[in-house]
Image (cartoon, rainbow, N blue to C red):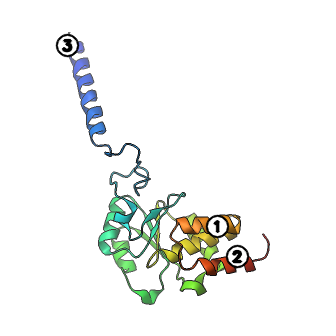
Amino acid sequence: MKNRNVFSVYHLLSLVVVFLMLACQSSDPGTSAQEAGAPAGSATVLSPDELLPNGKVTEDGLLVGGQPSLENFEKIKAAGYKTIIDLRMPEEGGTSREDIEALGLAYERIPVAGAAGMTEDKARRLAEVLENAAPPVVIHCKSGNRVGGLLALKAFYVDGKTAEEAMEVGKKSGLRSLAPVLEEVMAAAPQQ
């Protein structure tokens, strides 16, 4: 009889745990944590816009967008992201490397000077940094436009996408006003 009571208590506790897990799930069962902007295994579920201005999550799981504040970086850290890639020029200001690293986040800067920075070399550098970065990764500039542009060029030069496919990657990642520049850059590129 004693073993049967222990067994019943075990089942009761198991049911309580399952109930609590179900109660803590997102109110929208069709939205996964990753779709909501949180990396796999993250307990914090915030939308990409709550984590980053103009925030989006790419098909590759990158959180991309505009310049985060220190508060945004704290939310990004709490959501489980590990690496920040900053595409702003040093003179643009924003949160410092020291502040970001003090939060326990890895930090890389690839300075991209607007249209002049939309180059094959910068795209290949981004691919290299992404290859070596601890995931999940955040990529930002001031508005998200350069992020989309550089991801489009990476798709074109590194990932072997057509110019049309690369432009689509860029637009889904924040590319806006730099689109005509990228079309010219890719049109002038030697055939791959």
Classify 38 as above or below 14: below
Which amino acid is tagged 3? Lys
Q: Position of residue 2 (x, y in %)?
A: 20, 13
Number of residues whose C-alpha sits closer than 10 Å to that of mark 2, classed few (under 14), some (14–19) or many (20 or more)? many
- Residue 171, by quadrant, is bottom right
The residue under label 2 is 186
Which amino acid is tagged 2? Met
Q: Quadrant of the N terminus?
A: top left
The residue under label 3 is 2
Residue at point 44% right, 90% down?
Answer: 91
Mark 2 and mark 3: Cα distance apart in space: 75 Å
Q: Position of residue 179 (x, y in %)?
A: 59, 76
Mark 2 and mark 1: Cα distance apart in space: 9 Å
- Dot 3: element: helix
**Horizontal side, residue 30 vs residue 175: left or right:** left
Q: Earlier in the sequence, mark 2 or mark 1?
A: 1
